[in-house]
């Protein structure tokens, strides 16, 4: 099973310094939903892993978060696909929880729920906390520059850097295709 993990804000949707607090504020980055479609067609299971400290800060409630995710899943359904899971950390930066990236609790939960290691699994994110969580968990950190968090990336581990999810997805799919071709050639 091929698995790819995506951060949400700044990767799938436009991010905001004021947080995404309602379905009306949630807007997909051009090409991101289509990139998820392409990843799914290429045989990837697509999972979202997102820090959502707006809950702890009282900026929105769980019903609102679920409405935001419902908007995303409806838009994906309109394109004929879905994500395989949405995982989120509801805690704030000072709560010292195990699930908030850069800690790996959310990624560990994904591994348990999907019954597989995430070692080498692509994790596409836009922030230092995404890259650190991926590296610590043994996933493959891939950074996109479409989010607001690029300013904190100095010295962060990244295997690859792409403009956005669409270009990262194209590269992953091409890489998978090249590996299949190489395996067929060695038979």
Image (tube, grey):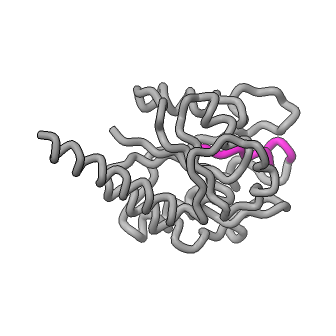
Quadrant in the picture for the N terminus: top left
Residue 141, given in percent of the width and then of the height, sits at 58, 43
| Residue farthest toward the left in the current orientation of the protein | 187
Horizontally, residue 109 falls left or right of residue 99, namely left
Looking at the image, residue 139 lies above or below residue 130: above
Residue 167, given in percent of the width and then of the height, sits at 51, 65
Residue 21 visible in the picture? no
Question: In which quadrant of the rendered view does residue 27 lie?
Answer: bottom right
Front residue (pair 187, 83): 187
Q: Please state the total of marks drawn on the protein image.
A: 0
Residue 104, given in percent of the width and then of the height, sits at 64, 29
Secondary structure predominantly adopted by residues drawn in magenta:
loop
Horizontally, residue 59 falls left or right of residue 112, namely right
The residue at 37%/52% (across/down) is 175
Asked if residue 26 lies in the magenta stretch, the reply is: no
| Residue farthest toward the front in the current orientation of the protein | 186
Quadrant in the picture for the C terminus: top left
The residue at 29%/54% (across/down) is 177
Looking at the image, residue 82 lies above or below residue 78: above
Horizontally, residue 12 falls left or right of residue 59, namely left
Front residue (pair 79, 40): 40
Question: In which quadrant of the rendered view does residue 102 lie?
Answer: top right
Front residue (pair 53, 177): 177
The residue at 79%/53% (across/down) is 60
Residue 62, given in percent of the width and then of the height, sits at 70, 47
Looking at the image, residue 95 lies above or below residue 41: above
Residue range in magenta is 49-57
The residue at 50%/68% (across/down) is 75
């Amino acid at each position: 099973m091929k698995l790819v993990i995506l951060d949400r804000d700044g990767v799938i949707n436009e991010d905001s310094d004021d947080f995404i607090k309602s379905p009306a504020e949630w807007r997909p980055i051009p090409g991101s939903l289509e990139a998820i479609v392409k990843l799914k067609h290429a045989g990837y299971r697509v999972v979202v892993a997102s820090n959502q400290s707006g809950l702890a800060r009282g900026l929105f409630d769980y019903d609102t978060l679920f409405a935001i995710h419902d908007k995303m899943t409806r838009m994906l359904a309109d394109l004929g696909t879905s994500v395989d899971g949405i995982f989120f950390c509801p805690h704030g930066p000072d709560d010292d929880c195990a699930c908030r990236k850069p800690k790996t609790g959310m990624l560990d939960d994904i591994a348990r729920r999907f019954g597989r290691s995430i070692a080498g699994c692509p994790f596409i994110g836009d922030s230092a906390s995404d890259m650190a969580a991926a590296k610590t968990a043994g996933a493959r950190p891939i950074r996109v520059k479409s989010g607001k968090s690029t300013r904190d990336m100095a010295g962060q581990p990244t295997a690859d850097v792409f403009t956005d999810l669409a270009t990262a997805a194209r590269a992953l799919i091409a890489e998978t295709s090249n590996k299949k071709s190489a395996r067929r050639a060695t038979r």
